[in-house]
């Protein structure tokens, strides 16, 4: 019985999902649930990812927070839902925590995260390569500064 369940869930998983992390600012394109399929228009929800839960399985979810007219709005999206058309990553921020629930109460400077903007044309593989290339260059610059001082 469990083998049939595993096979079924594997067929339902999406394969073209980007690597989503807490702190990312993303756009989620979602079809509204309803019976009239002809009049469906995709809704876009843009916000910051506070948490990612339940691993990479069929029940994986992300919590996205957005501030609308001074009021915080959070939505929980099941990543592998057939109602979600696509997910775009707009900005990636450096975080030291897996869950960013403290951003709910943080205001001003505490609510800001360090980060860098990602061009829309690049894909996740290119982003991963850039981050790998940047780390050795920083160490080389520090070594050259030490040599000059001697």
Image (tube, grey):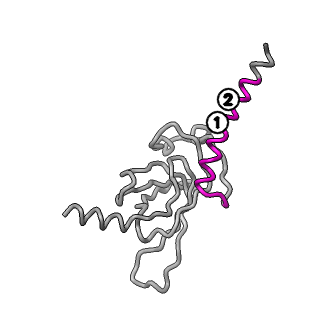
Q: Quadrant of the C terminus?
A: top right
* CB within 8 Å, label 2 to label 1: yes
Residue at 44% of width from left, 65% of height from top? 14
Indicate whether 117 appears above or below 37: above
Residue 35: image x %, image y %? 39, 83
Q: Residue placed at 42% from the left, 58% from the top?
A: 76
Q: Which residue is mark 2?
A: 139
Residue drawn at x 38%, y 51% as measured from the top left:
55
Identify the mark at residue 135; answer none if there is no mark.
1
Q: Nearer the viewer, residue 78 or 10?
A: 10
- Graded by Cα atoms within 10 Å as few (under 14), some (14 to 19) or many (20 or more), the crowding at tag 2 reads few
Taking the image as shown, residue 22 lies to the left or right of residue 5, namely: right
Q: Quadrant of residue 83?
A: bottom left
Q: Quadrant of the N terminus?
A: bottom left
Q: Is residue 90 left or right of residue 51?
A: right
Is-magenta flag for residue 49? no
97, above or below 4, in the image: above
Helix, strand or loop: magenta stretch: helix
Q: Seen from this angle, which residue lies furthest right? A: 148
Q: Secondary structure at mark 1?
A: helix
From mark 2 to mark 1, how far is it between C-alphas? 7 Å
* Residue numbers of the magenta segment: 121-144
Q: Position of residue 103 (x, y in %)?
A: 51, 43
Q: Relative to 105, does residue 15 appear above or below in the rendering?
A: below
Which residue is at a point 67% across and 29% down the rendered structure image?
139
């Amino acid at each position: 019985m469990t083998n049939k369940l595993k096979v079924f869930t594997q067929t339902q998983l999406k394969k073209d999902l980007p690597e989503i992390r807490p702190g990312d600012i993303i756009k989620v394109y979602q079809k509204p649930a309803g019976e009239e399929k002809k009049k469906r228009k995709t809704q876009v929800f843009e916000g910051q990812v506070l948490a990612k839960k339940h691993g990479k399985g069929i029940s994986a979810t992300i919590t996205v927070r957005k501030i609308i007219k001074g009021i915080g709005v959070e939505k929980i999206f099941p990543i592998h839902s057939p109602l979600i058309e696509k997910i775009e990553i707009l900005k990636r921020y450096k975080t030291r925590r897996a869950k960013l629930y403290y951003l709910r109460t943080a205001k001003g400077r505490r609510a800001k995260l360090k980060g860098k903007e990602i061009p829309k044309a690049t894909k996740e593989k290119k982003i991963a390569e850039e981050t790998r290339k940047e780390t050795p260059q920083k160490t080389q610059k520090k070594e050259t500064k030490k040599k000059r001082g001697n």
